Image (tube, coloured by chain):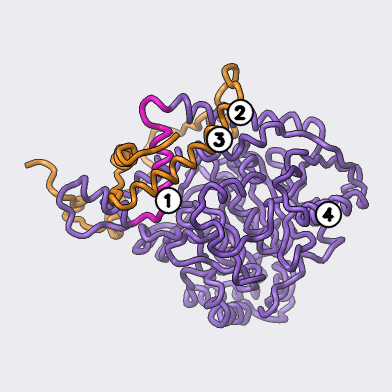
């Protein structure tokens, strides 16, 4: 059953080939048997899952089922889940049981999806390798000596290893698209404001956006349909109408204008990854697309400005962890300052502390203009680059990451080289645009992702373009050996 | 840009983090390298560029001025490290 996509599983549930209870038991058994090796889950909620599966079966029997009713999914442990541990991959929240549900969680539950558990992640979503988790690194199911990418590495690995049919992720600088690329799955970062951030633990609020991860674009469309929409509890939620994402999947892409930014294919890109991405673009040519060279001239400044904006917002957001209201508290504080400092230092890991320190520095008196204001101006330039590009083309294609997944530990002591690997994904977040990564031809057995970036609220077109590719290729069907 | 031990201590205090003396040097080195990366921003003249604070440049949505939240103090305090009579407990701040 686990090799099936969400779409295929939904058909099996509707036809009575299997029940949601059988499906959920099957996946729970797989998690128990296989996840010791991958470490993709922090918490498995077997009991609640069985309860939800029984309810889903009742809905299906009553003819009251939607497309994801009874489908076993997992949530990144950044989403608050009422009554279930919500750790955000941090010691700070190791003792935290969320007292309410995130909007994404309640929407998917209302649609009948069954939560199997909460997936591992880089601590507070800060990392590109999933090695900063308090719960240990996630191993890439394609090669357990390598990272799955991050920060939604647990979700990507769990989908790749078929431990769940789909999963949620969040993407602040590439955290859905890059692990999707490294694990050979499909992952969509929607337009900023498309999916509610309510109950999604904040890292960098002007960049954070939740989205779905699954085997296929068709599945991602079903998940996004349930996740997207206006939420008055998120002040940046968009009230732009949500289209029917499945309705346009099959549309022709004849005449589609694809832009290839020269800056995404420069010397930093691995030659074999380049070949895979170019082959994928060739497939689009054969489907009638027109390919043009374009330029995003400020690409070279994206990482530098991102690593000012994101840490600045992180230092502000993470000031809430004070050892007073929730989360880790140090033993025997001598005074309030000692309580704050020791609780935070014990609760946060090294990468989170680095980003809080950078953020605090760039926002401190006398440095604001030179760093934060400057980065916001570069953000404007990056956004203008995209605006001009979308006057010439419909979508932009390129790699999601300059290389395939690196070896565990390879970047652990070198934050700067890890930051630089985010070059192709951070741009999209700075501008607030939607982007998707889909599997293309692997390199030496390791998955490669093609990133497709669209204009604001153009998710339906991205899914259409991704689906057309998947109708004409089989890369998304490849599974790691031994799962 | 280079961070010495006193810079690290100053920023750590502002961020309410305790940095053990043995770790300050390594952390200072990391921060220096990150700021060297950030310094690439100086390559471009932005004097005529408007800063972008938010991707959608939306105006803040307003709602009617009425009570919408119910009091859930007990639920929210159930995850607090120490409370008493509905109050959060911290070390004594006023002698």
In the rendered image, which quarter is residue A432 located in? top right
The answer to whether residue A70 shows anywhere in this view is: no
- Please report whichever mark, 4 or 1, sits nearer to the chain's N-terminal start: 4
Chain letter of disc 4 in the image: A
Query: Tags 1 and 2 in contact by the CB under 8 Å rule?
Result: no
Q: Could you classify mark 3 by the number of other residues whose Cα lies within 10 Å: few (under 14), some (14-19), or many (20 or more)?
A: many
Query: Tags 2 and 3 in contact by the CB under 8 Å rule?
Result: no
Chain appearing in purple on the rendered image: A
- Please report whichever mark, 1 or 3, sits nearer to the chain's N-terminal start: 3
Give the residue pinned by disc 3: A305
Farthest-out residue, left: B95
The answer to whether residue A63 shows anywhere in this view is: yes
Residues behind callouts 2 and 3 on a single chain = yes
Chain letter of disc 3 in the image: A
**Colour of the chain lettered B:** orange
Q: Quadrant of the C terminus of chain B?
A: top left
Residue A280: image tag: 4
Is the residue A20 above or below the residue B51 in the image? below
Give the residue pinned by disc 1: A352
A357 magenta-colored: yes
Give the residue pinned by disc 2: A380
- Please report whichever mark, 4 or 2, sits nearer to the chain's N-terminal start: 4
Q: Could you classify mark 2 by the number of other residues whose Cα lies within 10 Å: few (under 14), some (14-19), or many (20 or more)?
A: many
């Amino acid at each position: 059953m686990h090799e099936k996509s969400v779409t295929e599983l939904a058909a099996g549930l509707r036809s009575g080939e299997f029940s949601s209870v059988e499906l959920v038991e099957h996946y729970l058994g797989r998690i128990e048997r296989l996840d010791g090796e991958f470490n993709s889950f922090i918490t498995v909620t077997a009991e609640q899952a069985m309860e939800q599966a029984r309810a889903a079966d009742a809905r299906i029997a009553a003819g009251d089922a939607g497309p994801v009713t009874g489908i076993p999914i997992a949530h990144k442990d950044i989403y608050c889940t009422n009554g279930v541990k919500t750790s955000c991959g941090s010691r700070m929240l190791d003792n935290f049981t969320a007292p309410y549900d995130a909007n994404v969680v309640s929407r998917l539950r209302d649609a009948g999806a069954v939560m199997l558990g909460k997936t591992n992640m880089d601590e507070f979503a800060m990392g590109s390798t999933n090695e900063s988790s308090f719960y240990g690194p996630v191993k890439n199911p394609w090669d357990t000596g390598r990272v799955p990418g991050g920060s939604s590495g647990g979700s990507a690995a769990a989908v790749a290893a078929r431990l769940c049919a789909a999963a949620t992720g969040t993407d602040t600088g590439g955290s859905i698209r890059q692990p999707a690329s490294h694990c050979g799955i499909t992952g969509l970062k929607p337009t900023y404001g498309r999916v509610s951030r309510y109950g999604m633990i904040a890292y960098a609020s002007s960049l954070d956006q939740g989205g779905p991860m699954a085997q296929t674009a068709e599945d991602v469309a079903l998940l996004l349909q349930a996740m997207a929409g206006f939420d008055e509890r998120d002040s940046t939620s968009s009230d732009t109408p949500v289209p029917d994402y499945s309705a346009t999947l099959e549309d022709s892409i004849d005449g589609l204008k694809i832009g290839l930014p020269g800056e995404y294919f420069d010397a930093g890109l691995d030659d074999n990854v380049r070949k895979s991405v170019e082959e994928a673009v060739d497939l689009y040519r054969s489907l009638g697309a027109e390919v043009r060279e374009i330029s995003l001239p400020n690409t070279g400044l994206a990482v530098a400005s991102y690593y000012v904006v994101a840490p600045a917002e992180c230092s502000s957001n993470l000031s809430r962890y004070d050892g007073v209201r929730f989360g880790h508290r140090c033993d025997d504080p001598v005074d309030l300052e000692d309580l704050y400092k020791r609780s935070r230092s014990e609760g946060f890991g090294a990468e989170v502390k680095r980003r809080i320190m950078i953020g605090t520095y760039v926002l401190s008196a006398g440095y604001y203009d030179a760093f934060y204001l400057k980065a916001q101006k570069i953000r404007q330039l990056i956004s203008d680059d995209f605006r001009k590009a979308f006057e010439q083309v419909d979508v932009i294609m390129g790699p999601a990451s300059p290389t395939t997944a690196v070896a565990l530990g390879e970047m652990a002591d070198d934050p700067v080289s890890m930051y630089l690997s985010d070059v192709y994904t951070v741009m999209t977040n700075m501008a607030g645009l939607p982007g998707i990564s889909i599997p293309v031809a692997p390199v030496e057995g390791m998955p490669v992702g093609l990133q497709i970036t669209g204009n604001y609220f153009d998710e339906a077109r991205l899914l259409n373009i991704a689906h057309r590719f998947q109708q004409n290729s089989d890369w998304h069907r490849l599974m790691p050996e031994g799962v | 840009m280079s961070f010495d031990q006193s810079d690290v201590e100053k920023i750590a205090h502002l961020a309410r983090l305790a940095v053990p003396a043995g770790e300050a040097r390594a952390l200072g080195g990391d921060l220096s390298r990150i700021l060297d990366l950030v310094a690439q921003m100086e390559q471009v003249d932005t004097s005529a560029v408007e800063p972008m604070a938010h991707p959608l440049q939306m105006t803040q949505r307003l709602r009617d001025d009425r009570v919408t939240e119910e009091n859930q103090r007990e639920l929210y305090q159930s995850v607090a490290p120490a409370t008493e009579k509905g109050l959060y407990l911290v070390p004594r701040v006023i002698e």
